[in-house]
Amino acid sequence: MTILEKFSHLRVAYEQLRSLGSDPFTVRFDGVLSPTEGLREGRRTILFGTNNYLGLTFDPSCIEAGIEALMQSGTGTTGSRIANGSYDAHTRLEQALADFYGRRRGMVFTTGYQANLGIISTVVGKGDYLILDADSHASIYDGARLGTAQVIRFRHNDPEDLRKRLARLPQAGNKLIVVEGIYSMMGDTAPLREIAQVKAEAGAYLLVDEAHSLGVLGRQGRGLAEAAGVEADVDFIVGTFSKTLGSIGGFCVSDLPDFDVLRVACRPYMFTASLPPTLVASTLQALNRLQSDPGLRARLLSNSRRFHSGLDRLGFRLGADATPIVAVVLEDRDLAVAFWNRLLEAGLYVNLALPPATPDGSAILRSSVSAAHTVQQIDTAIGLFAAVGEELGVLSPRPLAAMA
Amino acid sequence: MTILEKFSHLRVAYEQLRSLGSDPFTVRFDGVLSPTEGLREGRRTILFGTNNYLGLTFDPSCIEAGIEALMQSGTGTTGSRIANGSYDAHTRLEQALADFYGRRRGMVFTTGYQANLGIISTVVGKGDYLILDADSHASIYDGARLGTAQVIRFRHNDPEDLRKRLARLPQAGNKLIVVEGIYSMMGDTAPLREIAQVKAEAGAYLLVDEAHSLGVLGRQGRGLAEAAGVEADVDFIVGTFSKTLGSIGGFCVSDLPDFDVLRVACRPYMFTASLPPTLVASTLQALNRLQSDPGLRARLLSNSRRFHSGLDRLGFRLGADATPIVAVVLEDRDLAVAFWNRLLEAGLYVNLALPPATPDGSAILRSSVSAAHTVQQIDTAIGLFAAVGEELGVLSPRPLAAMA
């Protein structure tokens, strides 16, 4: 067997998928014109499958900050944070994040993936326990695998199951519970009040990954912990710059007094080049915009409600909560593939998620709403979902007026 | 024991290190003015501890390409390569890398760390063997740990030891040998001809990480495999954009027919936001500059020789080869810390590497040379090494004329 033959089953499945239409995992945009519009094969496509929640990737002040940093400090640092790659801007961004979250310490990573990988593989070790929501993101699972703590999974969003599993663990050893603010596929939020209570009872530590909830939930946009009023119970907030903040990179903030020791202990922080100045600058400016313009978040929420209720009224089976991530759940894989292809042909891009990457073995059309979507784009998207849903027999036909 | 107390020995050691002078792992530059000059605590500091081999971070055409992409496509993609994060430029960069290396396929990752992590953890699996040079970079070791193949280490740069260890393995299972073009700490190169021969005899696969050798070695700057004339024996070339190419990101190129299946199998590729357009654009332009201006590489090599022979003549114990990475090996840790601090106070920044991060338990002052260094900067650096070396008793005093 040659070295990549172990993936032949995957290759066959993938080829079969591609035979059904466009390849959902290599969609290429020839140009992206705005947070909500791309060019694909020569035609305009409405983007409804990004994580561009506040539409900041095209914010003039973020672009301007990025350009200024490029001109002033060059294209990159060519060094890790522990060598020559710490510029004043990196520490200013760390301070800004710590201030935003009201924490003593902040650490910036080069990707959000590496933030989860690094924090989770490092803060718990031999003799410790890592207790993960079963639907955790790949970066969390990979952090668990890279580290040496014993890994226990609890049923998705089930505080009772979490409680039971914690009760079975011995007294000795630190316990770190890891949950996400908003789960990226279904758009549901963690029951964080209950989880915080279980955590406190068990004397465990709690990490919340606010990747999809930063800039989305909470009065100040800090995420689910703020919205649930349990920030004091969270020991580590992890997040990313590649969604609401429109760049790449990740962070962790914490009040733990020894937190800074991670700078010389956490390998995915230490052994990678630091973020280029242009990304640090645009991220800092995006964090400013998030704080100075609450109207962005208000628009995001109103857009999300409009899109969610539009699809809901049509009769689609949706993910639980009305967050900017709206998952249309389809039982049948081939149906989902056909639906996704028809939407793309009609000029609407959403994400297709198939088992085994999805919870429950279901096939999902994942849409995500942006503050930058116009009401017209939202209604067009709802209309296309309605038309394709009827065409493919997912919805029973109904008068178009019902969508207004 | 609280959660970070497991690092208390490290914290104590780190605090002790800091009590000896500046903190070598949080040096902060208030500004970086060029590839070779930074501002630190209000004064100009010559940068001799970067990986900016061709000095391209301030290349006007690379900056211009980055600015244009920022204005045209925004600050980021807010999506992974397998969702909305593949733009035309990402695939152009992949094609440009494949063309540069004369390979059929290329894959771009968001960091070099994730390129090694992803390729190494994925291409070999259960029942396979991963045979690593003992001095491999952290990203290679982390890839080994994340994956499921059995890991075997061979003595650094010792093809005989590699041969012996391969001979002990059963026939079944794929074997992947991983080596680096230039090792980042000591600056020595792998004996790649001999390793390629051992690989062929054993029917193994070979991965070469050209992170520090891309743009440095080989007639066309492709790295050690080109320089050693064994490119046909290398199955996977991995590299980074954060050194010679002046940005961040990583890549893998290969001729394996099934290579593209990794796009739906390799988690550190799939589950991370793609590179922002500005970084893709400046990287592409840096790759153009590398190919169109061989004078850059000639200058780098002449600068490297000048610096290496200058320190050699002074009597320092140096890493084996005359590559742009020049390691001054000091037996004593405190001496190395003092030396590093004295250089920094005098306006010269180099990297300090201490055990256990170094081979052989030695303490290293790691310098790296850039094509952008002026002869004057190189001679100043040599002069400062001489002065501090004499002051601290590492060198016996000699007339300054010997340095000319």
Image: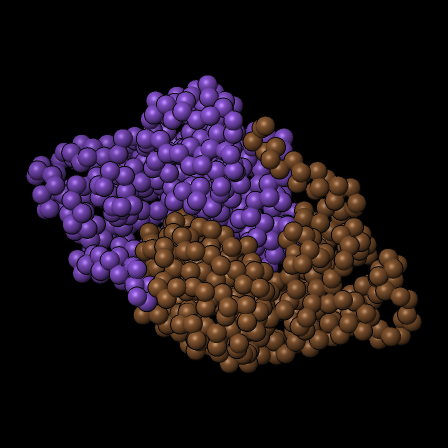
Chain colours: A purple, B brown
* Residue in front for this viewpoint, A22 or A202: A202
Q: Is residue B192 left or right of residue A39?
A: right
- Quadrant (top left, top right, bottom left, bottom right) of the C terminus of chain A: top left
* Residue in front for this viewpoint, A75 or A147: A147
- Quadrant (top left, top right, bottom left, bottom right) of the N terminus of chain A: bottom left
* Residue in front for this viewpoint, A134 or A19: A134
Where in the figure is residue B215, as x and y percent of width and height? 56, 72
Residue B307's quadrant in the figure? bottom right
Residue A328's quadrant in the figure? top left
Res. B67 in view:
no
* Residue in front for this viewpoint, B184 or A128: A128
Where in the figure is residue A246, as x and y percent of width and height? 45, 46
Where in the figure is residue A33, as x and y percent of width and height? 37, 54
Q: Is residue B249 left or right of residue B23?
A: left
Where in the figure is residue A308, as x and y percent of width and height? 26, 34
Q: Residue at x 42, y 60 (%)?
A: B129
Q: Is residue A123 above or below residue B25?
A: above
